[in-house]
């Protein structure tokens, strides 16, 4: 079965992560706070720092909207991490998610 979509699932998942209050509170903010802490300690930020949160988001997104797992391509994880890194790194550098 071919899945026809008229939206960008990767971008929509990013929106979901930021706008779903439960996901944001349980996963997104803690992930960003941990990355902020790593930056404060002058540790390098790696893609894997985002990956478990993004995988959880992709899973939750499919469940929430009753979509098949095939909604996301093999490249989706990397694409979503790229979007987050591009959009969030300036805020992280500015201390947006700082918990200390």
Image: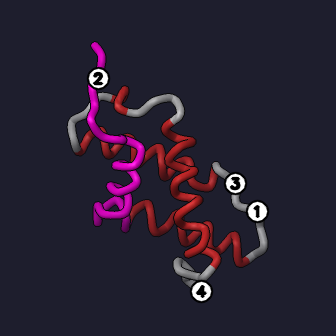
Q: Nearer the viewer, mark 4 or mark 3?
A: 3
Image coordinates for residue 96, horizontal then vertical, percent: 53, 80
Q: Which residue lies under the disc numbered 2?
A: 3
Q: Nearer the viewer, residue 99 or 4?
A: 4
**For the residues marked 4 and 3, what is the alpha-carbon distance in whole angstroms?**
21 Å
Residue that sits furthest to the top in the current view: 1
Q: Which residue lies under the disc numbered 1?
A: 44
**For the residues marked 1 and 4, what is the alpha-carbon distance in whole angstroms?**
19 Å
Mark 2 neighbour density, 10 Å: few (under 14) some (14–19) many (20 or more): few
Q: Are circles 2 and 3 on residues that touch, CB within 8 Å?
A: no
Image coordinates for residue 36, horizontal then vertical, percent: 62, 73
Q: Which residue lies under the disc numbered 4?
A: 100
Q: Which residue lies under the disc numbered 3?
A: 46
**For the residues marked 2 and 1, what is the alpha-carbon distance in whole angstroms?**
38 Å
Q: Is residue 92 above or below residue 99?
A: above
Q: Nearer the viewer, mark 1 or mark 4?
A: 1
**For the residues marked 2 and 3, what is the alpha-carbon distance in whole angstroms?**
32 Å
Task: Name the residue located 40 percent from the left edge and 54 percent from the top edge.
Answer: 14
Main secondary-structure element of the magenta-colored stretch: helix
Give the magenta range: 1-25
Question: Residue 13: within the magenta?
Answer: yes
Count of residue discs: 4
Whichever of callouts 2 and 4 sits on the residue coming sooner in the sequence is 2
Whichever of callouts 2 and 3 sits on the residue coming sooner in the sequence is 2
Q: Are circles 3 and 1 on residues that touch, CB within 8 Å?
A: yes
Image coordinates for residue 93, horizontal then vertical, percent: 64, 76
Whichever of callouts 2 and 1 sits on the residue coming sooner in the sequence is 2
Q: Is residue 67 left or right of residue 10?
A: left
């Amino acid at each position: 079965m071919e899945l026809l979509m008229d939206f960008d699932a990767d971008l929509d998942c990013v929106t979901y992560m930021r706008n779903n209050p439960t996901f944001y509170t349980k996963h997104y903010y803690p992930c960003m706070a941990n990355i902020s802490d790593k930056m404060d300690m002058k540790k390098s930020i790696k893609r894997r720092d985002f990956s478990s949160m993004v995988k959880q988001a992709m899973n939750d997104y499919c469940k929430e909207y009753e979509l098949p797992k095939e909604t996301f391509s093999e490249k989706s994880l990397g694409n979503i991490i790229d979007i987050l890194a591009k959009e969030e790194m300036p805020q992280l550098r500015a201390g947006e998610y700082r918990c200390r």
